[in-house]
Image (cartoon, grey):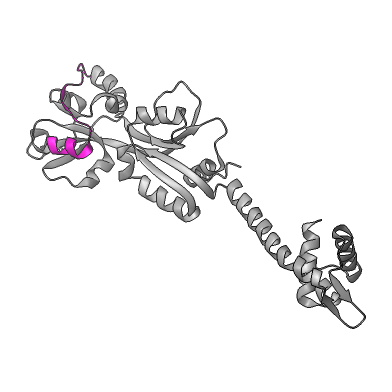
């Protein structure tokens, strides 16, 4: 029994005329007759009474047609669902992200993906970069918007955002009078920095630069949340080095100044996912970042 046979029977039942049904199906009348004969032979039931003047359903035909419509509808729904799954348009996606991503790329990416794949169950989790890589490795998240760090397992990445660091100073600080500041000027001050592993990326970026200027990073306070860092800077107890997008928060009592060094580091944000056969949903999400179909 073939799907084409079932479709032909439904059309013939609607038209009750071989010529009209054959035209709708785009086949010849003899071909339609052969489909009907083969199907009736397979199931051992006459489905249609036919004469030279009229075609009508038998009692067996009525019963068969009712179930056939339901079965064919389920098959067509199954085909559509399978195609959506293969394109990554259904299923689930767990996206992890660092705090700073919510200030730049995350809102636009989530909005675009929801429009492109409204049936995907999208879950979001904020955490630090080190934890994001661990969660990727263990399969607890599918994609991470994270700072680029080295890993001991295979991942693929695509750069999604790059921005300069700014020196964040108390509004009344002497260095706030300058259009830009140097690392050597900042190195004599206390830095407000994220605690522990959350500061790994920034330390890796700036420690060599401070060392070239003859200094180390002089830590004043360690706090994890961005608003807390800005609040401590506003209180006058130190400065911070933050990506440009942090200035969107509009914290009262702080000013932002670019770094004078031409080789000053930039903050990069990448999308990272496991290299080993990502799901269609992951490929669909990544295609929103890069414009690549990943087919």
Q: Is residue 56 left or right of residue 115?
A: right
Near-viewer residue (224 or 79): 79
Answer yes or no: is residue 24 visible: no
Compared with residue 154, is residue 270 higher up or lower down, i.e. above or below? below
Rendered-image quadrant of the C terminus = top right
- Find residue 30 and report its image quarter: bottom right
Image quarter in which the N terminus is found: bottom right
Span of residues in magenta: 213-233
User: Which residue corresponds to the image point at 36% horizontal and 49% vertical from the top-left?
Assistant: 107
Measured from the top left, where is residue 113 in percent x and y?
A: 46, 50
Q: Residue at x 41, y 49 (%)?
A: 110
In-image side of 158 versus 178 (left or right): right
Residue 134 against residue 16 in the figure, above or below:
above
Quarter holding residue 150? top left
The front one of 235 and 7 is 7
| Residue 128 relative to residue 271: left or right | left
Rendering coords of residue 235 (x, y %) = 8, 36
Foreground pick, 7 / 94? 7
Snapshot quadrant of residue 182: top left
**Does the magenta run of residues contain 228?**
yes
Q: Residue at x 39, y 38 (%)?
A: 96
The residue shown at (89%, 71%) is 29
Q: How many marks?
A: 0
- Residue 84 on image: x %, y %: 59, 51
Q: Is residue 30 visible?
A: yes
Indicate the position of residue 89 as horizontal and vertical percent values.
54, 50
Above or below, 20 against 244 in this view is below
């Amino acid at each position: 029994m073939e799907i084409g046979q079932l479709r032909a029977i439904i059309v013939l039942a609607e038209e009750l005329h071989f010529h009209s049904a054959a035209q709708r199906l785009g086949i010849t009348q003899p071909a339609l007759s052969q489909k009907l004969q083969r199907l009736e032979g397979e199931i051992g039931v006459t489905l249609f009474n036919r004469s030279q003047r009229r075609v009508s359903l038998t009692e067996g035909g009525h019963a068969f047609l009712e179930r056939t419509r339901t079965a064919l509808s389920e098959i067509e729904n199954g085909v559509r669902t399978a195609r959506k799954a293969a394109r990554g348009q259904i299923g689930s996606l767990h996206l992890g992200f660092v705090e700073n991503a919510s200030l730049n790329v995350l809102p636009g990416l989530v909005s675009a993906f929801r429009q492109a794949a409204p049936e995907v169950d999208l879950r979001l989790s904020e955490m630090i970069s080190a934890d994001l890589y661990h969660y990727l490795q263990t399969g607890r998240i599918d994609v991470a918007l994270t700072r680029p760090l080295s890993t001991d397992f295979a991942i693929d990445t695509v750069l999604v955002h790059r921005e300069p660091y700014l020196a964040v100073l108390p509004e009344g600080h002497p260095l706030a009078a300058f259009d830009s500041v140097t690392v050597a000027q900042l190195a004599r001050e206390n830095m407000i920095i994220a605690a522990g592993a959350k500061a790994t990326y920034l330390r890796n970026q700036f420690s060599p630069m401070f060392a070239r200027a003859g200094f180390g990073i002089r830590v004043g306070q360690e706090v994890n949340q961005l608003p807390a860092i800005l609040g401590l800077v506003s209180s006058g107890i130190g400065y911070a080095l933050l990506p440009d997008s942090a200035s969107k928060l509009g914290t009262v009592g702080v000013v932002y100044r670019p770094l004078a060094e031409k080789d000053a580091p930039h903050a990069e944000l990448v999308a990272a996912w496991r290299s080993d056969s990502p799901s269609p949903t992951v490929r669909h999400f990544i295609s929103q970042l890069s414009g690549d179909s990943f087919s």
